[in-house]
Image (tube, helix red, strand yellow):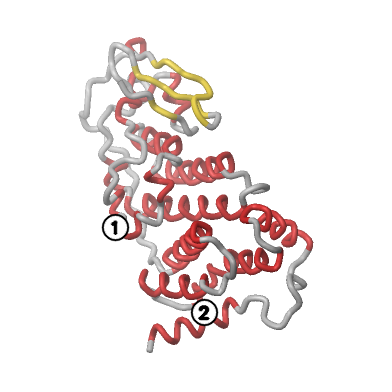
C-alpha cells in the first residue's frame, strides 16, 4: 500500500505534458535548455520537454517523507517509463539523477563533530628545503599533474585520488553504483585536492566545500551545459551525493592526518602544497 501511495503521488508531482500544448508551459529560457536537450539526445522538442520536466521535478519527491532507497528507485523508474523514445543510456542517467535527489532529500543530516586540529606527533617536521615537486602542466582537462620527488615526502605522497573502490566514507555498495564518475576517474582531480586539504588540516568544512565546487567545475569542463545539459546535470547529481558523504562521514579521515600539518614543516608548508589544497589536480605515481 505504501508503494502505491508513493507512485500515485509521483503521478501527481510529474504530470508531464497532460492536456497542454507541447511545451507551451515553458518560458523562453527553459525552451533554450529544452532545445539543447533535443539536440543532445536527438529527440523532438516535445519529448525533450518531458525530459526537462523529469529532471527539474525529480527533487519534488521531498514532499514524501522518509522514503527508502528502494522506494526512490521504484518511483523514479516508474516515471522514467513515461519518457517516450529515450534510449537506455539516457534513461539510466535520468533515473540516476532522480534517485540521487530523492535519496538526498530523505537523508537525515548528522551534526558535525568538532574540527579541532590534533598536533600530536605524527611524523618528523622536515625542513621545507627538503621538499621538491615537479609539475606537468595541462595534463588532462586543463588540470596539472604533480609528482613528489624531494628528499623528504610531502603531503602529496599521501594523496590517493578517490580512495578505495568500496565503502568510500561509509557509502554502501548500492549507493556507490550511483556514482560511476567517482569510480571511472572523472572526479580524481577534486578527490586529490580534498585528500591534501584533509591531510594539511585546512578545516573540514572548508575542504568539503572546495571538494564540492571542484567536482562541479569538472562537470562543467567535461560536459559543458550549453551542449550536454543531461550529462552535466547527471554529473553534478553524482557530485552532490559524494559531497554529502564526506560532509556527514569524513570526520575520521580528517582527524587522522599522517603528517605534521604545520606550515613550518615540509609536508604542508612547501609553496606548491599551499596551492594544491585549494585547486583540483592529478598526481603522478612512481
For image coordinates 37% across by 69% down, the residue present is: 69
- In the image, is residue 17 above or below residue 185? below
Residue 166 in the figure: left or right of residue 140: left
User: Residue at the spot x=57%, y=82% of the render?
Assistant: 12
Q: Residue at x 42, y 37 (%)?
A: 188
> For the point 32% across and 22% down, which residue is it?
154
Residue 283, position as x, y percentages in the image: 39, 27
Q: Which residue is mark 2?
A: 10
Identify the image quadrant of the N terminus.
bottom left
Closer to the N terminus: mark 1 or mark 2? 2
Q: Secondary structure at mark 2?
A: helix
Q: Is residue 253 above or below residue 10?
A: above
**Horizontal arrangement in the rendering, residue 262 relative to residue 12 (left or right):** left
Label 1 CA crowd tier, 10 Å (few <14, some 14–19, many 20+): few
Give the quadrant of residue 203. top left
Please give the label number shown on residue 172. Answer: 1
Quarter of image, res 108: bottom left
Amino acid at each position: 500500500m505504501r508503494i502505491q501511495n508513493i507512485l500515485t503521488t509521483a503521478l501527481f508531482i510529474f504530470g508531464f505534458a497532460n492536456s497542454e500544448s507541447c511545451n507551451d508551459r515553458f518560458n523562453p529560457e527553459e525552451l533554450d535548455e529544452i532545445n539543447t536537450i533535443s539536440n543532445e539526445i536527438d529527440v523532438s522538442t516535445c519529448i525533450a520537454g518531458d525530459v526537462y520536466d523529469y529532471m527539474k521535478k525529480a527533487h519534488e519527491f521531498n514532499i514524501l517523507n522518509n522514503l527508502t532507497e528502494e522506494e526512490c528507485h521504484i518511483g523514479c523508474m516508474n516515471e522514467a517509463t513515461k519518457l517516450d523514445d529515450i534510449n537506455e543510456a539516457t534513461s539510466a542517467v535520468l533515473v540516476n539523477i532522480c534517485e540521487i535527489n530523492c535519496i538526498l532529500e530523505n537523508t537525515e543530516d548528522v551534526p558535525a563533530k568538532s574540527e579541532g586540529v590534533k598536533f600530536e606527533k605524527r611524523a618528523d617536521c622536515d625542513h621545507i628545503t627538503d621538499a621538491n615537486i615537479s609539475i606537468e602542466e595541462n595534463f588532462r582537462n586543463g588540470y596539472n599533474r604533480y609528482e613528489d620527488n624531494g628528499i623528504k615526502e610531502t603531503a602529496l605522497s599521501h594523496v590517493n585520488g578517490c580512495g578505495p573502490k568500496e565503502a568510500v566514507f561509509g557509502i554502501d555498495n548500492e549507493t556507490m553504483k550511483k556514482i560511476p564518475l567517482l569510480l571511472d576517474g572523472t572526479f580524481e582531480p577534486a578527490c586529490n585536492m580534498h585528500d591534501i586539504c584533509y591531510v594539511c588540516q585546512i578545516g573540514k568544512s572548508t575542504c568539503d566545500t572546495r571538494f564540492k565546487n571542484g567536482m562541479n567545475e569538472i562537470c562543467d569542463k567535461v560536459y559543458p551545459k550549453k551542449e550536454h545539459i543531461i550529462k552535466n546535470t547527471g554529473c553534478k547529481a553524482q557530485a552532490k551525493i559524494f559531497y554529502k558523504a564526506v560532509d556527514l562521514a569524513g570526520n575520521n579521515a580528517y582527524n587522522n592526518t599522517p603528517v605534521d600539518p604545520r606550515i613550518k614543516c615540509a609536508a604542508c608548508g612547501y609553496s606548491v602544497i599551499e596551492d594544491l589544497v585549494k585547486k583540483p589536480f592529478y598526481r603522478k605515481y612512481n
